[in-house]
Image (cartoon, rainbow, N blue to C red):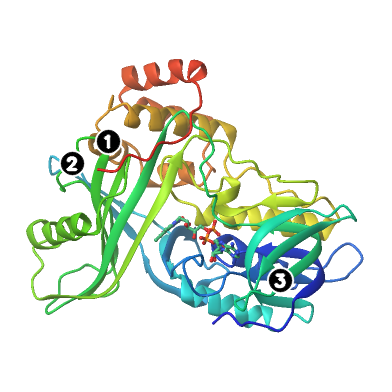
């Protein structure tokens, strides 16, 4: 658990606002890092108290080759991916030495806390932050209030703010990846623990956007089963429940299923530009700093790359500005995909299904991780429906960026 410490006025090298994926990953990297003069940074991590502001627990998945820094808290991993097209065709891929891995956020919090407990200059504060700005006296300053309403102030040389943005920046295309998942337990064997069903398009497709099932087996009888849409607006709770009942019962044919936990979320999919610099000494990280990949919603791996780069800049005594989470050409390709999906020019289910049928999975995973070469990206581009993608690409430069309107259904 995140402790409330009786600290209300702190002076540190680095203030980290928010203890989610980005804040904790950065704190983890900074712990044990020394600067050019051999000194470890003093760090304050400020997390919201229990309640509406604090991000609820969640599950993060990502792919990795070999063991990574968070191996001890990887809850499950898979060596094979499967994508099922709406017409029943199946793309299956062995991942070789790569694994698709799952971490649950409470385990991640515990891991980072254990590491941070060894760092003498670490302050963990529980406060609702309402302002992070440059300090006219130099450095940055974080203002908030603790659970009793008392003011909390953190002065730092540099501040990294991961609070989710209240409003999305203006964009040419905005969709939402919204989902609800059940952690299910079945009465008999029902899952293949080696294989993750990444996208199962045998779900009824919505009028706008696409939907799919996502199955993460945790054993032969346990799994996280999600119903996901990429579409203009989230559903109501009963609609997700109905979709999950249909998917688990009619599509997967599960029976004797007990729902032991649930998870839900909304991830913006947008070609908006998220400024990473909010002041001379204030930076944004995580989703707030543009780490979410526009066409897929994957964020966790980009957050790790950003955290590494920031810690490396600290080590070298450089300005620790977070680098762009995704290369400009990948953001451009994602903008075209989003435009084609948002206008309905391509059928999303067919688009993603064909992508996996016509490309080796390792090429796609390298592309999604920003490690692909231009010729691989050309091959990926040519495996998509070229006329609607070209039309979307050609019109993007002349489209105005607008505020996202969330349509309720
Ligand atoms: C349910 C769910 C599942 C996801 N699964 C995946 C996945 O499998 N793989 C993947 O790559 N991406 C996934 N994502 C997308 C993304 O990785 C997550 O949203 C991730 O948590 C984003 O990290 P973050 O640090 O930017 O934001 P968060 O993790 O939300 O962290 C922000 C932190 O700021 C704190 N905070 C907010 N306001 C204040 C305030 N005023 N004062 C102080 N603290 C504040 C919050 O409590 C929170 O701890 C998922 C998203 C959701 C919603």
Q: Whole-Å distance between the Cαs marked 1 and 3?
A: 48 Å
Dot in front, 1 or 3? 3
Q: Residue 110 at what x, y percent from top left?
A: 54, 80
Q: Residue 285 at what x, y percent from top left?
A: 63, 53
Q: Secondary structure at mark 3?
A: strand
Relative side of 276 to 74, left or right? right
| Above or below, 16 relative to 204 | below
Quadrant (top left, top right, bottom left, bottom right) of the C terminus: top left
Dot in front, 1 or 2? 2
Q: Residue 367 versus residue 161: which sits nearer the camera? A: 161
Q: Whole-Å distance between the Cαs marked 1 and 2?
A: 9 Å
Residue drawn at (44%, 16%) of the image: 395
According to the picture, the residue beneath numbered tag 1 turns out to be 348
Q: Secondary structure at mark 1?
A: helix
Residue drawn at (48%, 72%) of the image: 51
| Above or below, 239 relative to 358 | below
Dot in front, 3 or 2? 3
Q: Whole-Å distance between the Cαs marked 3 and 2?
A: 49 Å
- Residue 151 circle label: 3
Disc nearer the start of the sequence (1/3): 3
Q: Residue 373 at what x, y percent from top left?
A: 53, 35
Q: Residue 342 versus residue 10: which sits nearer the camera? A: 10
Q: Secondary structure at mark 2?
A: loop
According to the picture, the residue beneath numbered tag 2 turns out to be 205
- Residue 364 circle label: none
| Above or below, 71 relative to 249 | below
Residue drawn at (48%, 29%) of the image: 402
Disc nearer the start of the sequence (1/2): 2
Can residue 73 be seen at all in this image of the molecule? no
């Amino acid at each position: 658990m995140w402790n409330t410490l009786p600290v209300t006025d702190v002076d540190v090298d680095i203030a980290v606002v928010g203890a989610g994926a980005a804040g904790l990953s950065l704190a983890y990297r900074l712990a044990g890092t020394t600067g050019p003069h051999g000194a470890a940074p003093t760090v304050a991590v400020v997390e919201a108290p229990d309640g509406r502001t604090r991000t609820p627990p969640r599950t993060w998945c990502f792919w990795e080759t070999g063991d990574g820094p968070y191996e001890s808290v990887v809850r499950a991993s898979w060596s094979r991916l499967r994508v099922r097209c709406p017409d029943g065709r199946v793309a299956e891929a062995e991942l070789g030495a790569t694994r698709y891995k799952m971490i649950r956020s409470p385990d991640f919090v515990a891991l980072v806390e254990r590491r941070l407990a060894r760092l003498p200059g670490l302050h963990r504060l529980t406060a609702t932050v309402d302002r992070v700005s440059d300090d006219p006296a130099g450095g940055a300053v974080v203002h908030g209030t603790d659970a009793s309403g008392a003011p909390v102030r953190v002065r730092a040389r540099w501040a990294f703010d991961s609070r989710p943005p209240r409003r999305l920046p203006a964009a040419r295309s905005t969709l939402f990846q919204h989902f609800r998942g059940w952690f299910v337990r079945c009465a008999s064997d029902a899952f293949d623990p080696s294989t993750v069903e990444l996208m199962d398009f045998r779900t009824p497709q919505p009028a706008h956007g696409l939907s799919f099932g996502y199955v993460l087996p945790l054993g032969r009888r346990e799994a996280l089963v999600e119903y996901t849409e990429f579409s203009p607006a989230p559903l109501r709770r009963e609609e997700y429940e109905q979709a999950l009942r249909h998917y688990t019962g009619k599509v997967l044919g599960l029976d004797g299923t007990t729902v032991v936990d649930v998870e839900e979320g909304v991830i913006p999919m947008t070609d908006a530009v998220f400024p990473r610099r909010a002041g001379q000494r204030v930076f944004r990280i995580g989703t707030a700093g543009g780490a979410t990949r526009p066409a897929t919603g994957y964020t966790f791996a980009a957050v790790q790359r950003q955290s590494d780069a920031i810690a490396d800049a600290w080590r070298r005594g450089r300005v620790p500005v977070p680098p762009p989470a995704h290369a400009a050409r990948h953001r451009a390709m994602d903008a075209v995909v989003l435009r084609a999906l948002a206008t309905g020019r391509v059928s999303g289910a067919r688009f993603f299904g064909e992508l996996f049928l016509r490309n080796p999975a390792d090429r796609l995973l390298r592309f999604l991780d920003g490690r692909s070469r231009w010729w691989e990206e050309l091959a990926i581009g040519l495996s998509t429906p070229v006329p609607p993608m070209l039309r979307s690409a050609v019109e993007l430069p002349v489209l105005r960026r607008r505020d996202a309107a969330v349509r309720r259904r």
